[in-house]
Image (cartoon, rainbow, N blue to C red):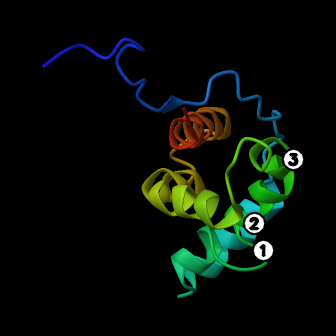
Amino acid sequence: MTADPAGPAQAARPAEGLALPALEEPEALRTSLREAVLAGGDLDQGLCAGEGSIGAWLWARWRAALEPAGMSEAAFLAVVAGYRRELWFWLLGDRGWTPLVEGLGGRVARRILVA
């Protein structure tokens, strides 16, 4: 078997240099979501599905950076849903906002693959 003269195929890699805007913590949203969930509301609905969810709130603010990088709203919300545990800790006050959004931003960047 001979080597490919073009070299080995490059594997897809995470997007580099994705710049997501820093965001102030949405304290009123956090409070209302926490109260709704603790009153028996659907956690997934509050985190990533529908109007008023933290996923929708983040998408509205990060969309301009994510769509040109190739991430759809559905793909973004799937990443948010996968971050459910950390979001729950944030709702309860056991996780700070800055580490939460930095971690989520890193996860999003890893999901945007470039050739």
Q: CA distance from mark 3 to mark 1?
A: 19 Å
Residue type highlighted by circle 3 = Ala
In percent of the image, x 48 and y 50: which residue is there? 86
Labelled disc at residue 56: 2
Where residue 34 sits: x, y (%)? 63, 69
Instruction: Farthest residue to the bottom: give it.
Output: 40
- Crowd tier of the residue under label 1, counting other residues whose Cα lies within 10 Å: few below 14, some 14–19, many 20 or above: some
Q: Quadrant of residue 75?
A: bottom right
> Does the residue at mark 2 contact the one at mark 1 (Cβ under 8 Å)?
yes
Mark 3 or 2, closer to the camera: 3
Residue 9 in the image: above or below residue 88: above
Mark 3 or 1, nearer chain start: 1
Q: Is residue 15 left or right of residue 72?
A: left
- In-front residue for pair 92/110: 110
Residue type highlighted by circle 1 = Gly
Labelled disc at residue 52: 1
Labelled disc at residue 65: none
Q: Which residue is mark 3?
A: 64
- In-front residue for pair 83/63: 63
Q: Quadrant of residue 91?
A: bottom right
Mark 2 or 1, closer to the camera: 2
Look at the numbered disc 3 and give the secondary structure of its residue. Answer: helix
Mark 3 or 2, nearer chain start: 2
Q: Is residue 54 left or right of residue 6?
A: right
Look at the numbered disc 1 and give the secondary structure of its residue. Answer: loop
